[in-house]
Image (cartoon, rainbow, N blue to C red):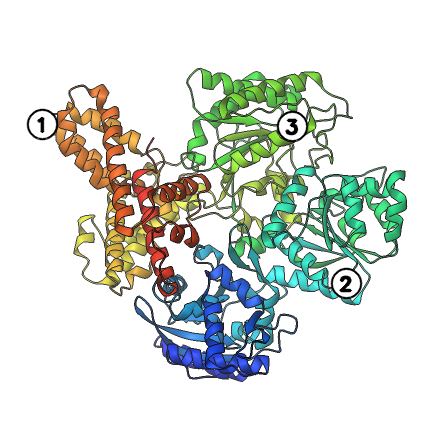
Amino acid sequence: MTTQPEQVLENNLVKQLQDLGHKFVNIKDEKGLYANLKTQLEKHNKTSFSDNEFNKILIHLSKGNIFDKAKTLRDSYGLKRDDNTTFYVEFINQNFWCQNEFQVSNQITIEGSYTNRYDVTILINGLPLVQIELKRRGIELKEAFNQVNRYHKHSYSAVNGLFQYVQVFVISNGVNTKYYANNPKQSFKQTFFWSDENNKNITQLEQFTARFLDPCHIAKIITKYIVLHESDSIPMVMRPYQYYAVEQIIERVKNSTKNGYIWHTTGSGKTLTSFKASQILTNNPKVHKVVFVVDRQDLDEQTVREFNAFQKDSIDGTENTKMLVNQFLDDTPLIVTTIQKLNTAISKVRFNDKMKQLQDKKIVFIFDECHRSQFGDTHKKIVDFFKNHQMFGFTGTPIFAKNAVAKESKKNTTAMLFHDCLHKYVITDAIRDENVLKFSIEYIGRYKENENSKTNVDIEVEAIDTKELMESPKRLEAISNYIINNHSRKTHNRTFTAMFCVSSVDILIKYYELLRASKQAGNHNLNIATIFSFNANEDDKDANGFIPDDEFSDTLPINKHSRDKLEEFIKEYNATHKTNFSTKDSESFFNYKKDISKRVKNKQIDILLVVNMFLTGFDSKTLNTLYVDKNLKYHGLIQAYSRTNRILDEKKSQGNVVVFRNLKQATDDAVALFSNKDALETIIIQPYEEYVKKFNKAYKTLMAITPTVDSVNDLESEEEEVNFAKAFREIIRLRNVLSSFSDFTFDDVYMEEQEFDDYKSKYLDLHEKIKTNSQKEKVSIIDEIDFELELIHRDEINVAYILRLLANLKNATGKDLDKKKKEIVDALAGETQLRSKKELIEKFILENLPLIADDNDIADEFNSFWDIETKKALDNLCTEENLDKEKVETIINDYLFTERKPNEEEVINALEKQPSILHRDTIGVRITDKIVNFVKTFIDGIN
């Protein structure tokens, strides 16, 4: 059977869209796009526009970037008509989303910096709001994604930027179909399959079109389920399970007084889901208030920040109970508060009279992480006080009878308090959809009960989990040494960070002091920090992962020893990070906690030691490893493990969990409870030996294409080059997984390490070739391959490493000289961070190195050389692009601090002369790329 041509796929899709109710319109070019837009806007607004009036509309539509245009689409425009009256032009009907004008067109040709023809376009009221890019069956879906990215660079900003109004992209090769929001900054990981209510993915284009691209449904997605993220200035589209959860909550409020809960696994985006549900509910005239309830002060602030990121100034944080009461009484539609403040508001006499006014009002409560916030007396108080309430809970780990903790001989479950589960999206669903990562779990320690576990921590014992064994100095020291020796491997040379959770504060103090002493002895240079509560009841006696509602309070009894020790550790932290925190008051302690959270996310802390804190509710994509010396089970175990499995990039292939206790059965039980009996294989990655087999199989595939390194040079066609790139990319991915195992060595696989490095250089050479061809706008099928360069970047190979090689080169002669030169050439060729610096380093070797008399001066001379070259390059950039140097330096400093690419407005403002609107986007992209490349070449890795 022959492969279905792309044209047949396109023709079938256009016909199906017409059958669904999209009217076909033949638009060939810019002129046709404008004419159709005028006609459709007139039809939608039930009026007609003169050419002058329509030109004003076009000017209004042309302003701003993609994010600005997403806002423009949702706002009406006050058009000053020719007769001086004002007419409000509506671009899309958001309240009655089916009442819009739906059209489909194909092969629209746009002249940008290069000519592009788009496959299939859905227009709503004449604006292109959905763009569908097709590839023939058998082609990688990612190639369609890369095609869209080229359109972003080449032509979407042309014709008044009308194609920047696209809200949703759809990419398909017929058998696989995904959708995503119009955000050029995102990676392929932010593309999603649509699914049915039971999370079964709908991948075939025909079925996807029937469900997702139906006129009413796609209009509803655009008007209701795209969120404009204010702090990042990007549009976000909700995933199917988020959509179904919100729809279920809206439906229940509309037609029932019953409660309900949403079971969406940890890391799947519950905050966005709960925000959207809360936002839509505030528009329900029957609902007086929506109250979003969290159970700790830091989560309160975090939630307010995240909600306001989704919609600017949508809510104010309730700083104290008095402010909360005032918000209940004023016109604030959405309140975010802690369960403690809510309890105070309805319990204390001084607030009671005011709050009684609300007892009969319709109040909808949405509880975040309801597995831990709703099992005390407060729940009963809320139910008794608010007579017309409705409650919804969100949890990644519900409480069932099996994992409930008895309180006063009674076990409360999530279903007992919240009634029905309205929608499920469990951990197996999330891992299948690649919304969270699998776990790699290693059980470290040789115990009599577990003869097959690894022997890195060599402790012989007769029994396990006894206090004497668990707290023995020999064991604690062995574990500390294991962490020091393996941390770099686990975190890809400190590209990522880790947490270490332990059983009690006393044990934490001992671990901290062992790690500190080892650092002082010169055994490691890891940045260690810790935080714990110092109340008398600070330890997790049940080991369930329940965290007390008040982790710090001046009213609770204080453990003076713990407090003194924490104060000592905070002083060390202050000295390291130039901060000024303490335990002397709650505000300073909470600020310390927030600062630690920020520094873990920014990779300024390598290992954070905790007992309970940060094991739930803390999200950091840069954290990939959890060391565990603590008994965990059920929801506490899953919550703790899930700190490691947030999606980041290709390099972060799994969450690493290193367990120093016998938690194998507890892990199996937890996985079974929160997914299904057969979930282990899905959730936990396969054993080391299985990945060795996969690597060797991938190596055989590579050998069939390029049996030697030199044979890469002999590849004659682009198809052969594509096959090589894909084959070696798979080798890199598998090596990335293997490298996180403590046991990994190249001796276990068919490929030698030097051979891997040699092929890696060829792989990078091919990438450079494609990048060069792309700049010349040569159309190439290899240009659609994602080389995933982040997988092969290693932080330890940096400029400091090169300087050490230069010092060796300075005194080398003969064969040794050739060997040292090859080491430097290989390092420059094999590391993505150094390749951008290759020409400059070679220039230094040729022109400066021979003139340096003393080896000790090499570093200073190199720094001086680098400063001169950096200044020269910055001056050239500013001269070539006519930029204000001071403003460019500010942009670069902000970029280095925030790690976010400069936005178009900043770049354009740095120009000495402002460009026309027509050329604004093209110039902005070009200069941004130059600034990013400048930073990559002259600043990244230079220290």
- Disc 3 versus disc 2: distance between alpha carbons? 40 Å
- Disc 3 versus disc 1: distance between alpha carbons? 62 Å
Mark closer to the observer (1, 2): 2
- Residue at the disc numbered 2: 253
Residue type at the position of mark 2 = Val
Mark 2 Cα within 10 Å, few/some/many (few <14, many 20+)?
many
Which quadrant of the structure image shows residue 895? top left
Mark closer to the observer (3, 1): 3
Report the side of 168 relative to 930 (left or right): right
x and y percentages locating residue 896 in the rendered image: 41, 40
Taking the spot 73% from the left edge, 55% from the top edge, the residue there is 333
Image mark for residue 589:
3
Which quadrant of the structure image shows residue 808? top left
Disc nearer the start of the sequence (1/2): 2
Using the image, determine if residue 138 lies above or below residue 409: below
Q: Residue furthest left?
A: 814
Residue type at the position of mark 1 = Gly
Taking the spot 41% from the left edge, 64% from the top edge, the residue there is 141
Between 463 and 262, which is closer to the camera in this rendering?
A: 262
Between 90 and 309, which is closer to the camera in this rendering?
A: 90
- Residue at the disc numbered 1: 814
Disc nearer the start of the sequence (3/1): 3
